[in-house]
Image: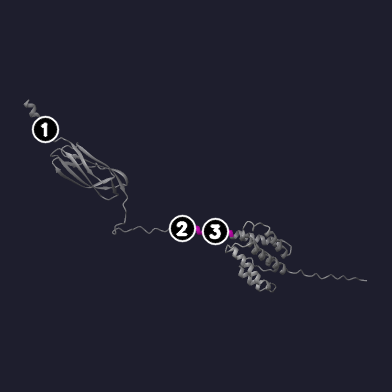
């Protein structure tokens, strides 16, 4: 019996010193900024009198330990203070292992998931932006492209209308009827076209003023196809046969400009007045046919 008691007393110090190694507590922040050192702490329990060491290469490549401090809190307690540098982004797991100096195979591991966030740069006045200024590519480029497209569309519309106008003038030139007869028939066709009933007032007045321009060119040789209203009036004033119609033409052209450029909505009364004036102007200014001289026939007796 004494031998058994003596054996237990001999083995007790050995068993007490072989209690192993255990992690009792850790303090590691769950979220840390990228490439900015953070503090990690672990309290380890071990056998009385044992000392603890950090296991080299126990930390994954996502982290680097820049400082280690192992402080004894009690004969069987050790506090490990670490300074850790995160080298990755998003989520990762920080792992570090400790071992007993007396028995390196006795290991305790700390494993903690972390979220590494991007660093907010240049909040410190000591940092300066060294990249070249960003060129205002986005909105400036798209604005230039948009303006170019609008200009191209306007040019195409103008060209199409010009071709249509030239085609109208060409067809009028091929018509052998007198200029006033052609113009009056065009007015009748415009009134019956349905443009007014479909509320296409702008196109109605464009066609109405084009009839006037085509009549002046065919009947009197006045090329006013590209003239503004003011330029057309200046030409008219130089022609004696139009002196009494200057005021009426001014009102007629002003009425059309309000519809074409100011988007005014004309009344039916205004339309009738403009159509009636143009008919009257064409009828009164139509060139008179030259009287034919009778042929004399000599009769020989």
Position of 209 compared to 5: left or right? right
Q: Is residue 226 visible?
A: no
Q: Which is nearer the eye, 137 or 73?
A: 73
Residue 42 position within the rendered picture, expressed as x and y whole percent measured from the top left:
21, 43
Residue 103 position within the rendered picture, expressed as x and y whole percent measured from the top left:
17, 37
Instruction: Name the residue that disc number 3 marks.
Output: 152
Cα separation between marks 3 and 2: 17 Å
Of the two numbered discs 3 and 2 on the same chain, state the one appearing first in sequence. 2
Residue plotted at (46% across, 58% down): 141
Cα separation between marks 1 and 2: 84 Å
Instruction: Name the residue that disc number 2 marks.
Output: 141
Q: Main secondary structure of the magenta part?
A: helix
Query: Mark 1: few, some, or many residues within 10 Å (few <14, many ≥20)?
Result: few
Of the two numbered discs 1 and 2 on the same chain, state the one appearing first in sequence. 1
Instruction: Name the residue that disc number 1 marks.
Output: 12
Task: Give the magenta part as a residue range.
Answer: 140-157
Q: Can residue 21 be seen in this view?
A: yes
* Quadrant housing the C terminus: bottom right
Q: Is residue 144 magenta?
A: yes
Q: In which quarter of the image is residue 230?
A: bottom right
For mark 2, give the secondary structure.
Answer: helix
Residue plotted at (13% across, 33% down): 15
């Amino acid at each position: 019996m004494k031998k058994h008691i003596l054996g237990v007393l001999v083995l007790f110090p050995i068993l007490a010193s072989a209690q192993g190694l255990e992690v009792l507590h850790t303090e590691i922040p769950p979220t840390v900024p990228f490439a900015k050192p953070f503090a990690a702490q672990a309290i380890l329990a071990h056998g009385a009198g044992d000392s603890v060491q950090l296991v080299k290469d126990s930390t994954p490549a996502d982290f680097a330990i820049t400082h280690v401090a192992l402080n004894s809190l009690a004969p069987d307690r050790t506090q490990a203070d670490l300074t850790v540098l995160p080298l990755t982004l998003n989520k990762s797991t920080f792992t570090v292992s400790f071992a007993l100096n007396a028995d390196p195979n006795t290991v305790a591991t700390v494993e903690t998931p972390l979220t590494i966030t991007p660093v907010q740069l240049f909040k410190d006045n000591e940092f300066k932006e060294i990249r070249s200024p960003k060129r205002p590519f986005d909105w400036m480029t798209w604005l230039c492209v948009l303006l170019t497209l609008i200009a191209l569309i306007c040019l195409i519309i103008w060209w199409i209308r010009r071709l249509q106008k030239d085609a109208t003038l060409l067809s009028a030139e091929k018509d052998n009827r007198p200029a006033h007869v052609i113009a009056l028939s065009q007015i009748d066709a415009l009134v019956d076209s349905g443009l007014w009933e479909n509320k296409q007032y702008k196109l109605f007045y464009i066609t109405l003023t084009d009839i006037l321009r085509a009549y002046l060119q065919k009947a009197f040789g006045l090329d006013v196809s590209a003239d503004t209203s003011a330029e057309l009036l200046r030409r008219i004033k130089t022609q004696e046969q139009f002196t009494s119609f200057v005021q009426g033409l001014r009102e007629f052209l002003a009425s059309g400009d309000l519809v074409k450029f100011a988007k005014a909505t004309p009344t039916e009364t205004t339309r009738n007045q403009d159509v009636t004036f143009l008919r009257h102007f064409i009828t009164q200014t139509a060139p008179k046919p030259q009287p034919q001289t009778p042929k004399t026939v000599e009769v020989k007796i």
